[in-house]
Image: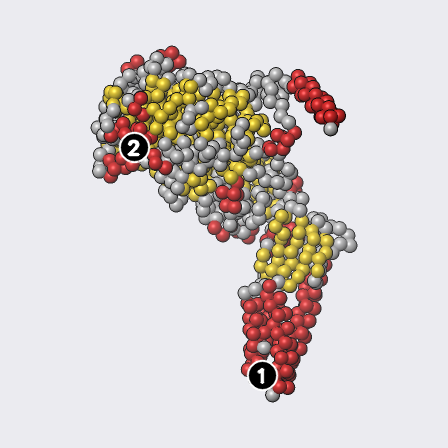
Amino acid sequence: MMTGALLLLTLFILPLWRITLEAPQYPKPLEIRIHISKMAGDIQNINIMNHYVGMEKLPEKMKEFELFPPIVVAMSVIGLLFGFIGKKKLYLVWFAAMVILGTAGMYDFYRWEYNYGHNLNPKAAIQFPGTTYQPPLIGSKVILNFRANSYPASGGYLLFAGMFLSVAAFYSAGKEEKRM
Amino acid sequence: MKSYSKTALAVLFVLLLSLVFFGCQQKPGGGAIGQSTAEKAFVAPGEYDSHYAFISGGFSGQLAIHGLPSGRLFKVIPVFSVDAEKAWGFNEETKPMLQTSHGFIPWDDSHHPDLSQTNGVIDGRWCFINANNTPRVARISLQTFETEEILEIPNSAGNHSSSFVTENTEYVVAGTRFSVPVPQRDMPIAEYKGNFKGTLSFIKIDPEHGHMNVEFQILMPGFNYDLTHPGRGKSHGWMFFTTYNTEEANTLLEVNASQNDKDYIAAINWKKAEEYIKAGKFKTLPSKYAHNVYDEGTHSAATTMEKEVRVLDPAELPGLVYFLPTPKSPHGCDVDPSGEYIVGSGKLAAALTVHSFTKILKAIEEEKFDEHKYGIPVLNFEAINAGTVEQPGLGPLHTEFDGKGNAYTTFFISSEVVKWKLGTWEVLDRKPTYYSVGHLMIPGGNSRQPFGKYLLAMNKITKDRYLPTGPEVCQSAQLYDISGDKMELILDFPTIGEPHYAAGCPAELIMPNSKKYYKIEENNHPYVTRSEADSRVVREGKNVHVYMTMIRSHFSPDNIEGIKVGDRVYFHVTNLEQDYDVPHGIAVLGATTSELLIMPGQTETFVWEPKEVGVWPFYCTDFCSALHQEMQGYVRVSPENSNVKLTWTLDGE
């Protein structure tokens, strides 16, 4: 349980999510790495690419970037605390809280993607009526000459691993309690 | 069984017949090559060549980068000649690179590229090349593929025996082809003999940054110093220069410099020279020579005029120089990978002469001197001779090695490359060239470790080998596969200028270090504009500085007003892109200069002195993006006395 809670802290270094854009003239695909407090990767090049179709620049500041770090710290501390107390029900509570927060996060991510892909400058140089540029929530999708892929990144996988560990802890603790 | 062999015989007969037929259809120049041979030079679309070749641009003054085995031309690096395409010598940043003690020179003749080495092996850091006419040596970065430094050589004329590198890149050398009065002065040409001097310059290379300086010069008799190669392995610490015109003729050299039965190879002990320098046994000659350095941080070059040079006199310094008698005006001077054999190609001789380094040391120890020439000992020919390759061809010029005990020599007059064996001196193979081959290059040829797969022959004459292009026909090189016992011609390809020497190495030594773009935050150009928000126009009297940025697909600013006739307008243009292969260019109508071609993260400057009132457009000259054609702007030029306010805008802001 404690390991699971600690894994959350890797999010301060590792990216949560990754969107890559593949096209023949980019032998190395363009990449956005979404961290809990920033976006990293080929930001300038993606902005240059997207301004032709009237998309906004990728945000440097978002309220999520201020909100996420304290939530991650809080959940990690709570997780550690629960692990310390060692009551298996608390593990499940932590897991459930994580699922709720995660779902909320994904919904928020979807809303941002929707806005990013639909909110187009009417003066854009290149306009394809009816075309929008929303990247997939998860999976791959062809957008004009690009193939956009959206998947969890290393931090995201460790987050899932942490959540899995909390459930595992719940079950193994259950067995130990029975034995006692 | 019997009928089977009959069929085989019939097939063989048909094959032979077809060979005769196709043989008849070959053009007189010969060299039609089979499909399977062609495959050896074929690099499929999207695939990479296995080797880089750095081929001298000859009288173009530049350096060409080709791939081997395909022969494809990748880039022409401007070195000693202006290049309007890349603004080399036109923009304010690179004008200092072509400064000399004689002023700005827009052209030279580049001959012998050589690659830097560590422990006798090519290290892929720098390429050096010499300017023959106004003596200079250039250093080219193999990360940026740009010329980073050009050093003028004082007291020299016709810098031909250059720019060969010692095995730890301690020195790059420069020798004088034409002896001249040293220092230069007004004197009768007829008094050449005994009065003119030749200098051999040792240019020290700073191991970290590659910066060059003339460490010392050796003041030699007034012969012509033709070519050179460094000792390596056991002969490391020595440098060997061929000489001709030991007759010291000053007119009709084709006759008067061809009289002596033997000229010399000058063997220089540069480790000894270092000792003499340390001991203070040098004279300091006042001189004037330009040292031009390009700084990657400021994207700008600066010239320093050097004022003196240290000179060693071999007549007074024993053990510094020995002469090795070598028949008939030797041209090429080549040292085998072990450092034991020094091959002198007497270009008027019927045989190739090979000296033994071990024997040279022994002869020096036993003082087997035939005579002294201007105080320099001449070693006995028989005492140092390792062997002779008899009747190999006509007009031997240059030799390279495959690292497997074989040597390959070019023959200008008989137009061929001849393979022979070191030690036994027997001829193993010969193949024609088309025509009149000069240098040859085996990648890693001037090192302890040649990569003996390919041999590149560079020809002086092409005549009927390509589609004609008027009186001036194309220059050409030919590639041979030397991995088997016999050499095999696999490719002809055109080159720029006249290809003299070349250097080559496997691609993996260079490719991983090739720079992709310059980081904008590391750009310390004094007139950099790091963001669009900083773009502006500043007037300082008659000088107007435009701080302009470029990014797909616009300039900032793109409308400028308030420029007046008589102004001197500096366009300092920064490419804000931070991605591979996104250069932008700029040119303004009527500007009496070249375009700028600016790499991502770089700043370049051109000067425009508008003479005519009007509204003049400028545009991006490199097709950068889908809206490249829209990447344009206007400058309004008003009369000298007008009151138009200085303004600069992008999209009305």
Q: Which mark is residue B250?
A: none
Specify how the rendered protein is coloured: secondary structure
Which amino acid type is marked by label 2? Asn
The residue carrying pointer 1 sits among few (fewer than 14), some (14 to 19) or many (20 or more) residues within 10 Å by Cα, namely some
Which amino acid type is marked by label 1? Gly
Image location (x, y in percent) of residue B176: 35, 25
Say if residue B409 shows up in the picture. Answer: no
Image location (x, y in percent) of residue B380: 28, 22
Does the CB distance between marks 2 and 1 fall below 8 Å? no
Image location (x, y in percent) of residue B359: 31, 28
Q: Observer-nearest residue: B63 or B315?
A: B315
**Tag 1, which secondary structure?**
loop
Image location (x, y in percent) of residue A43: 60, 55
User: In the image, what residue occupies the spot 23% across and 30% down?
Assistant: B317
The chain ID associated with circle 2 is B
Say if residue B196 shows up in the picture. Answer: yes
In this rendering, the answer to whether A26 lies above or below B106 is: below
Q: Which residue is mark 1?
A: A86
| Image quadrant assignment for residue A56 | bottom right
In this rendering, the answer to whether A129 lies above or below B463 is: below
As drawn, the residue found furthest toward the front would be B1
Left or right of residue B145: residue B29: right
As drawn, the residue found furthest toward the right would be A130
Q: Which residue is mark 2?
A: B269
**Tag 2, which secondary structure?**
strand
| Image quadrant assignment for residue A163 | bottom right
The chain ID associated with circle 1 is A
User: In the image, what residue occupies the spot 57% across and 67% down?
Assistant: A11
